[in-house]
Image (tube, rainbow, N blue to C red):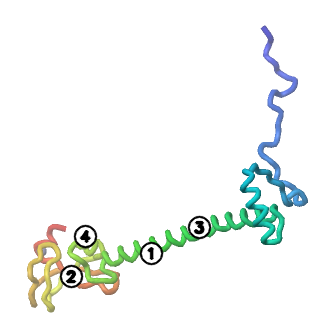
Amino acid sequence: MKPPRLGGKPSHPPGRRGRKPAPEDERKDRIIQARVPEDLETTLKQAAEKRRMSVSHLIRNVLEDTFTLVDNIVADSSALVEQVSRDARRVAATVRGECDPPKPAGKEAVLESVDAWQDVIVNKPGNCIECGIDLKRGQRAYRGLSQLSGVPPVWLCSHCIEKL
Ligand SMILES: [Zn+2]
């Protein structure tokens, strides 16, 4: 049995992990080889001849176009995402009653927009948003206060305010 080694060479010599970035003078054109079928080679040669450039240059252009195109798609997707979130925000604003009068389905959203309920005397008749009861002039009711502009009046009757 060998005694444990206490000294000597470390089994894992300290080394640099990963690759060093290439020096500036090495970052020039590289050669990439690719096997292509004969008819593709013919097509490439003809296309290059037609454009009065080398096959290498043609392929390089094609590749550059392709990857620029990929970049454009990426850019377009992010623009699309932005457009979709803008639409979603607009829909949400509509539901909250920022743009259009609230729809019956948006009741929860309307109630959500209310910061406080103010104990008032009704002047213009309305309806309780919860039970729908008529709120007549001179009657005591609760008017929802909201920071959102353009929100139609939100009312609660004195019965429904107890259930908050
Ligand atoms: Zn009510």
Write down the residue under mark 1.
86
Q: Report the disc number at residue 108.
A: 4
Compared with residue 128, is residue 30 higher up or lower down, i.e. above or below?
above
Q: Position of residue 8 (x, y in %)?
A: 87, 23
Mark in front: 1 vs 2: 1
Write down the residue under mark 3.
73
User: Between disc 4 and disc 3, whose residue precedes?
Assistant: 3
- Which amino acid type corresponds to the residue marked 2 in the rendered image? Arg
User: In this image, 142 relative to 29: left or right?
Assistant: left
Rendered residue at 83%/33% (across/down) = 13
Compared with residue 7, is residue 42 higher up or lower down, i.e. above or below?
below
User: Between disc 4 and disc 2, whose residue precedes?
Assistant: 4
- Which amino acid type corresponds to the residue marked 4 in the rendered image? Glu
User: Answer yes or no: do the residues labelled 1 and 2 have beta carbons within 8 Å?
Assistant: no
Nearer the observer, 30 or 11: 30
Q: CA distance from mark 4 to mark 3?
A: 39 Å
Does the residue tagged 1 have its C-beta within 8 Å of any atom of ligand 1? no
* Ligand 1 position by quadrant: bottom left
Crowding at label 3, few (<14), some or many (≥20) Cα neighbours within 10 Å?
Answer: few
